[in-house]
Amino acid sequence: MNNTFDKPESNPGFQKAIQLMRLVANRAPTIKVDGHFCTVVAPPTIEYFPGLLALANVKRKLGLDVDRSLELGRVATLISTQLKDVVHSFQHIADGTVGEEFLDQTRFIPGTFPPLHKLPEDFPERSDGVIPEGVVDLLLTTGSKKQIHETAREACWDYFRLCENPVIIICQQPSKVATELVDLAIENEWWTPEQIAATFDAGTSPEDWFRRPIICINPRSIQNRQWMGELKPSAVIVVGFSAWATPARWVWPDLPHTLFLDNRSDDVLRFRTWHDGQLFPTIHSEFAKLKGIPGLPVKFFTEPFLAPEQFSDSDWDSYGADFE
């Protein structure tokens, strides 16, 4: 078996794979098609490829620190490196204060406010969190040509902005994929500081939204969490056909998905059997003519939208998926 892509080494094959993943990440969302668009990639070994695409989709997000259209309600925000969910009002924004929930208001200069992200009404209660150790130091590293952060507060706020629209990886082994992200960070010349920061303690639960730039979750964890459909990831990556066969791919049907199939299992056969039984429209796009590199086939298709209410609870166990 060709193991060219087994490890994140600086070799020509892996470099080509990086280029392809970045192309998929940058171009796929620009394709205008009717229906649910999916890119299918079947590498010689699935290890590292979901992480490659996830990191390629982590991009610095610039914007206003405060959305003044936010109404009274729960928001995710931060104080220093502390991640918090609080209740705010427009008055707090107008006068630059932070409300009674923040006991130490002296940390803020009058008229300033940290980023705020509106939480859906049924978003679960959770305890305070913290930006992973080492992230701020990484984003403030001196002498880097990619250095763009001048203060610790700026670094924290930029990291928090990345968490508003995280990359979602739907897989059966979230902890394993999160570990592979750490391995990829070793090749730091490939990534921006924000992308490397996203490999620090990747999320492994839906409740990590607004806390981590990359979240690895299994399909079952999405079930009965309707609030997830109200939020928007920056990208959706599905690992394995068993995960794809569940209703998880319909949580964000308007976003392009990337499906990774494992050549070392019966993934490809099961996908082909399923795909051959469908009537999918032809995609007319220059991007769809993209040639894969040897050993890394790429396929594109769209499928008609299926409403989540069309599925039953048993559909989350399609094809005998072995969830963690």
Image (cartoon, grey):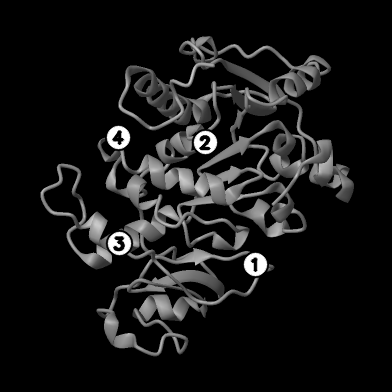
Q: Amino acid at mark 3?
A: Gly
Which of the two discs, 1 and 4, sits closer to the camera?
Answer: 4
Mark pair 4, 2: CA separation: 16 Å
Mark pair 2, 3: CA separation: 24 Å
* Disc marking residue 123: 1
**Residue drawn at x 10%, y 49% as measured from the top left:** 143
User: SS for tag 2?
Assistant: helix
Q: Amino acid at mark 2?
A: Pro
Q: Earlier in the sequence, mark 4 or mark 2?
A: 2
Rendered location of residue 3, percent (x, y): 48, 21
**Residue drawn at x 17%, y 59% as measured from the top left:** 150
Quarter holding residue 207: bottom right
Mark pair 3, 4: CA separation: 19 Å
Q: Residues within 10 Å of mark 1 (few under 14, many from 20)?
A: some
Which residue is tagged 2?
Answer: 50
User: SS for tag 4?
Assistant: helix
**Residue drawn at x 61%, y 19% as measured from the top left:** 300
Which of the two discs, 3 and 1, sits closer to the camera?
Answer: 3
Visible residue check, residue 167? no
* Disc marking residue 134: 3
Mark pair 3, 1: CA separation: 28 Å
Rendered location of residue 209, percent (x, y): 54, 59
In this view, the residue in front, 183 or 58, is 183
As displayed, is residue 168 above or below residue 15?
Answer: below
As displayed, is residue 65 above or below residue 41?
Answer: below
| 88 with respect to 97 (left or right) | right
* Disc marking residue 190: 4
